[in-house]
Structures are given as C-alpha cells and as structure tokens.
Image (cartoon, rainbow, N blue to C red):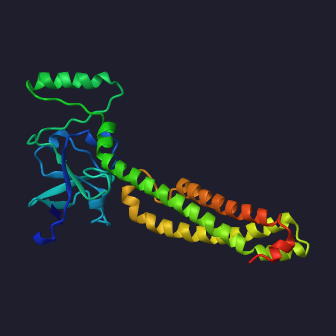
Amino acid sequence: MYRLPEESRDQLKRIDYQEVMPGYFSTLGIPVVAGRDFELSDAGHPVVIVNEAVAQHWKEGGAVGRTLVVGGTPRQIIGVVKNTYTAELDHIGPALYQPFTGADIPKVIFRTRNPAAAAAVEVLAGRLVPGARAQTLPLSEYVDRRLAPSRVAAEIAGLLGLFALALATVGMFGVFAYAVRQRTKEIGIRMALGARAVEIVRFVIFGTSCALACGLAAGFVAAAAGARLLADYLHGLSPLDPAAYLWSGSILAVAALAASYLPSRRASRIDPSIALRHE
C-alpha cells in the first residue's frame, strides 16, 4: 500500500511490490524511461523505482525526486520504468521496486542462449549455499504456466464462438433462401416481361448484398464496442483484430450469397406460368 505525502492515511492505494537487484530491468528488457536503475550502493537506502502507472501522479516535473510513503516510510523515487505485466497477466497496475535487502529468498533471473547454462547455475548455487535447493525455469515456460487458465478459457470461448458463428450461418442461409422463395411470383412476372435468367440472379443477389452489407456493418460496430470490454484478457492481441473480423465476415457473406444464388438460379429456370401461379 502507498500514498502521496500530502494524502492522509485513509487514502492508501494498492501497489505491486518487488525487491530487485541491479540489472533486473535490463535483463527483462524493461526500459528505464526516466531517472536511473539501481546500483549496489542503493541497498539499505529508502529509494524506489516506480512504473508509469505511479508516475502519472506527477504530470508536471516528472516523478524522479518525488517521495512516496510506502508502509509508513517515505521513499524517494530515483527512476521510472515502462508499464509491464508483473503479478498478473490480465492488467497492468501501479508497481514499485526497491533494492534487494536479503530478507527474502532471492529469485535469480538471467538470460542466456545456452541451455547448458541452466545446469551450471544449479551447480554454482549448490556450491555457494550448501544444501540450497536451486530450480531453473525458462521464462517462456513460466509465462505459459501463468497463461494456462486464460488459454483454457480462451479455447472454450473460441469453441462457443465457432458454434455461434455456425448457428448464425445456418440461420442466415435459411432466412435468405426463404426470402427468395417468397419472391418466386415476382420472378415469374419479370421473366414473363422478358427478363433473362442472369438478370434475375443479378437482381436477387444485389438485394441480398445490400441487406448483407447493412447487417455486417451494424454487427462490426457492435462487436468492436463489445470487444473493448475484453481488451484486458486478449494477451498480445488487439480487440480490433482484422483477421477475426475478415474471416467471420467472409463466412457470413459466402453463406448469404449462396443462400440467394441457389434459389434464384432455380427460380429463373422454371416456366413463367408456373412461377405466376406460385403462392
């Protein structure tokens, strides 16, 4: 929990808190956008680094050099880093980092391209601290574990979405096919007046295309508005993903055009006198 010096104690705000060592941000590729990184000499001093979510309290003059009250102790901000996912992967909140004090069991993070380095680190840890249990875990595997619940939920949501798309496709096919059959008498009149089969098909498809375009436009607007509510759960994806809209729109368009083409083609081949007697 933290607060600004001018705020009262009942105005405490939640914050993600971590103890890190110098080089932590460069190892994970987190840019320091203002101020500086920690140094070994900072250990034991009341200094902190915050992310941009905290730094937004000081829009004028910046956050570097300002003071935060953390756990009842004033601490000076010496740096600001970019917002990044820390404790949770579904949102980015205020984050605070302070120099490692040694009070907790350290979690060592290093980056290497050599798989054998992991085993070497385990051996080295055992030599430095006899009896210590060392475990190495690739960062990608760690992220995969944290994303597992979200991935399962996304797969279930995707299956439900495909099922809904299939229902919408079948329903729209039936609606457009029924609408064309209802116009059989009109088609017979046009054929009796000399309209050719290709003109009948073009006329029906044009009407269907207009209705389809209006429906897709309204659907895309509603989907874009609703997708923003899920933005925090779409890790690495945009709520306005063009591929998703393109594929779903294309499937619905093909279904609508097929539903119009097949009945209109069939109606254009029947005898005009039969079409005129159609009820």
**Dividing the picture into quarters, in which one does residue 276 lie?**
bottom right
Q: Residue at x 31, y 32 (%)?
A: 111
Quarter of the figure with the C terminus: bottom right
Near-viewer residue (61 or 237):
237
Residue 190 to residue 133: above or below: below
Instruction: State the residue in front, 222 or 44.
Output: 222
Return the x and y of residue 157 as percentages of the image width and height. Answer: 41, 56
- Which quadrant of the figure has residue 116? top left
Residue 173, percent from left and from top = 62, 63
Check the image and report above or below for 263 versus 101: below
Report the side of 255 relative to 37 (left or right).
right
Does 117 appear above or below 21?
above
Residue lying at 10% horizontally and 26% vertically, measured from the top left = 129
Residue at the extreme right of the image, as rendered: 194
- Is residue 219 visible in this depiction of the protein? yes
**What is the x, y in percent for residue 269?**
83, 63
Residue 80 in view in this figure: no
| Residue at 15% in and 61% down | 1
Q: Above or below — where is 22 with respect to 229?
A: above
Image location (x, y in percent) of residue 230: 39, 61
Residue 8 relative to residue 191: left or right? left
Q: Front-most of 70 and 274?
A: 274
Residue at image location 15% in from the left, 41% down from the top: 41
> Could you say which is closer to the camera, residue 178 or residue 195?
178
Residue 20 quadrant: top left
Q: Total number of numbered labels?
A: 0
Q: Is residue 123 left or right of residue 259?
A: left
